[in-house]
Structure formats: C-alpha cells, structure tokens
Amino acid sequence: MTEASSPVSDRTRLRRYHWLGKYDRQTIYDIIDAGIICQIGYIFDGKPYVTPTSHWRIDDYVYWHGSSASRMLKTQQTGIPVCFTVTHLDGIVFARAAMNHNVQFRSVMAFGNAEFVEEDKKREALAAFTDKLAPGLWDYARPPNEQEWLATKVIRLRLDEASAKVNDLFAGDEEEDLASDRWSGAVPLYVAQRDVIPDPKLAANIAMPDFARLFRYTKK
Amino acid sequence: MTEASSPVSDRTRLRRYHWLGKYDRQTIYDIIDAGIICQIGYIFDGKPYVTPTSHWRIDDYVYWHGSSASRMLKTQQTGIPVCFTVTHLDGIVFARAAMNHNVQFRSVMAFGNAEFVEEDKKREALAAFTDKLAPGLWDYARPPNEQEWLATKVIRLRLDEASAKVNDLFAGDEEEDLASDRWSGAVPLYVAQRDVIPDPKLAANIAMPDFARLFRYTKK
C-alpha cells in the first residue's frame, strides 16, 4: 500500500487547477512529514471548526494529540468526520497580469473519520512523535507520570482519502503578456531557524544535548 | 471599533491554556497581517472541509478570492458559517519532561458567516490585496480583462467573533523538573526569503521593478 497511489475519490479529485494534483503516496508522505503543524477541520454543534495542532505520521496514519479534557478531542474521539490539511508556503509569484499573481506551495488534504488511539498504542505513538521531531528526545526527557499520562489523548486519521497539491510554477501568463515589457518572477520562501536559546531557568553547567544541537527543521 | 477588544463569545473564549488567549484588535490584526495564507473551514454536504488560500485584511474584514467556478466559493457566497484561521509557527520548545514539549506560535481564529463581495467593492478589494503584498503591484500589472474579471470572485468575513492565541513561552516544567540536570530550550523558527528568481520566460532587458526588489515577506 505504501508505494501505491492514493485512490482518487470525489472529494480528493482536484477540480480547480487539476494539473497541480498529485496522488502518489510518497508525495503525500513527504509533504506531511515536512511540517509539524496541521489544521484539523471538524463539525461541532453544526458549525465548522479549524484547529491548528502538531501532527506526525506513522505509516498510513496521521496523528495528533492534546488534553484529555479538550472539547475538540472529546468530539473527535467519537469517530466524527474530519478534514486534515498541511500547507507549506514556498514562494510568491509576481505575474505580468494582475489576475495571475500566485503562490508556490505544497499542500495535502485528507478526509475520513477520526479514530481514538487506545492505551496499548498510545506510548508508541507519542514516542514516535518526539523522536521524529528530534531523535533521542523521548528517552532524554523525564517520562510521563500517571497523571500526565491520563491527561493526554491521541487521535489519528487513516490516509485513505488523501491528495496533494503542488505549485512550483512561475506565472501562467498569456502569450500576449509574455511579449509585453512587464517583469515577472518569484520570491522563494522557506522556514529558517535561528540559534537555539537555552531556557532562562536552566541551571548552570547543563550541556545542550545532541538532539537540540543537531536539530534541523528541514530534515532533507 | 478598531481599537477596542473583540467581544469574547462562547466560541472564541479559550478553554485550554486560556492564559495564551488575546482578544485585543491590534494583536488579532497583526497576526492576520503577518501572513498571506489562511485556512478556511466550512461545511459542504454535511462534511467538514478546510481550504488553504491567500487572505488579506481591510479594516475589520478578512478577504479571500478564487475562481467564480470554485465549488468552495459558490458554497460560501450563500452566506454559510465559516471558520477562518491563520497560524504562524515561531519555534519549537524542548522541555525537561516528555509531556511538556511544545511549539511557540501565533494564531487567530474567527467565526461568522461568509459574505459575497459585490461588484462595486471588488476592484478596491483586489487592488488592496496586491498592494498589501507589494506596494505598486496593482498599477504595474496588466489590468484584468472582462473575462478574467468575471472569472474571479471575492468573499469576506467580518471579524466580529475573533480571538488570538500566542505562545512565546519556554517549557512549563514543574519545580522538581527544573531542579533536575535535564536541558531545556527553544529553537526559533521564521519564514525567510531567498533572492528573487526572474521568470525563465522573461524577455531580455526587462528590469526588476521596485516592488519585487524591495519585497520583504516580514513587513516589520
């Protein structure tokens, strides 16, 4: 399954700019794995909600977590339909024609029913989350005590109905605009990181561990 | 109204981590204006959808646009409830305790009914969009012809029910963890830009205009 293409459903088939649509698993995985913040859409009391939260992926599932008391997670754990999205802004395209300015981006959208992650899979899921963020982080930190453990809930979504959309193009200007003397181009954008800042409350003589020293937001 | 605080509704009042909630207009405006990509949540056929799209703000409204043939916009222009969100990832916080790792971020969430922007306000709205992106861009580009004009639709949402959430804190570790020999700190993240890339189809001898040369993703 992991190397196959995602089946194209009525919801995942791109209607607008369909030539930007990608349905292969690797493209979908790479876009999901390149970010740590997703947006989860769901319905509560008949109204739409979108919640930004951290996500991670294990095989063909995306995961997110939060407080056991969270209304969002209490609602989602009943198995309601959700829409999972990740978006990376890669650049701004200035076109020759006013209606052709655009952005370069990579995004994934996935639909399905949320699943509550049961106790026997929860530790493995949370360890995978922290170790994807920074290898070694799970073993380094003080493990959760019982109260913290019970206060945290994990939810997941199977990537059955998923699609990606990638725009890395320059402006789609018409021939007559290409022949004009107007300029066009793109400004590439990316997520950069600054030097690590030790916690101001850090006791003296505690060395920065490798997971922090070697941390790179962009893994490849 | 612009200097006042946003009224706190049942939907905008932060339930979890309520101390991160901000309800003053300027904080909400600054977070919206610092980005160009938002996520719009809405309901179609009883299911939740989240669509990433470009946004801009004029006074107390956020705007987005798209193809007149777009199913999303056709659905939204009927005045359905939407959830508008913007999220900026500002850093990753490594804590001493496994359950206290966190992200630094700024986000805004707004609820309300989408409004179709009528013909008489559409040009002003689109000109404001491009000029916020890069001052002078609207006048530089070839103006829309009638076909392009009809093919574009603008939607807006009044920021009546909006809240912001800002986390710029280090780890919220407990006293006993602070006293341990475990390290903690934050990796600041930001959106950076690379040198402008002229369109490969650009004719020779067309100079880069100021709006591109001076473009800065972060306005302040």
Image: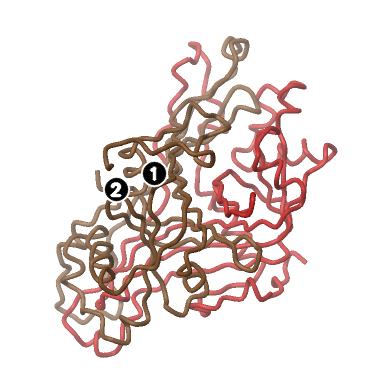
Chain colours: A red, B brown
Nearer to us in this view, B133 or A20: B133
Look at 28% across and 68% down and name the residue there.
Answer: B126
**Relative to B11, is B124 on the left or the right?**
left
Number of the label disc, if any, that sits on residue B190: 1
Query: Where residue B49 sits: x, y (%)?
Result: 58, 62
Front residue (pair A158, B61): B61
- Is residue A31 rendered to the left or right of residue A142? left
Secondary structure at numbered mark 1 = strand
Horizontal side of residue B207 vs B164, given as left or right: left
**Foreground mark, 2 or 1?**
2
Evaluate whether label 2 is on the same chain as label 1. Answer: yes
Q: Are marks 2 and 1 in contact (CB under 8 Å)?
A: yes
The numbered disc on residue B218 is 2
Residue B212 vertical placement versus A67 (above, below): below
- Give the residue type that dot 2 points to: Thr
Give me the chain letter of mark 2: B
User: Where residue A150 sits in the image (x, y, percent)?
Assistant: 76, 28
Tell me what residue is drawn at x 18 percent, y 56 percent.
B214
Residue B216: x and y, percent?
25, 52
Which element carries disc 2, helix, strand or loop? loop
Image vertical order of residue A76 relative to residue A175, above or below: above
Residue B44: name its quadrant. Answer: bottom right
Q: Is residue A149 left or right of residue A205?
A: right
Dot 1 surroundings within 10 Å: few (below 14), some, or many (20 or more)? some
Q: Earlier in the sequence, mark 2 or mark 1?
A: 1
Quadrant where the C terminus of chain B is found in the figure:
top left
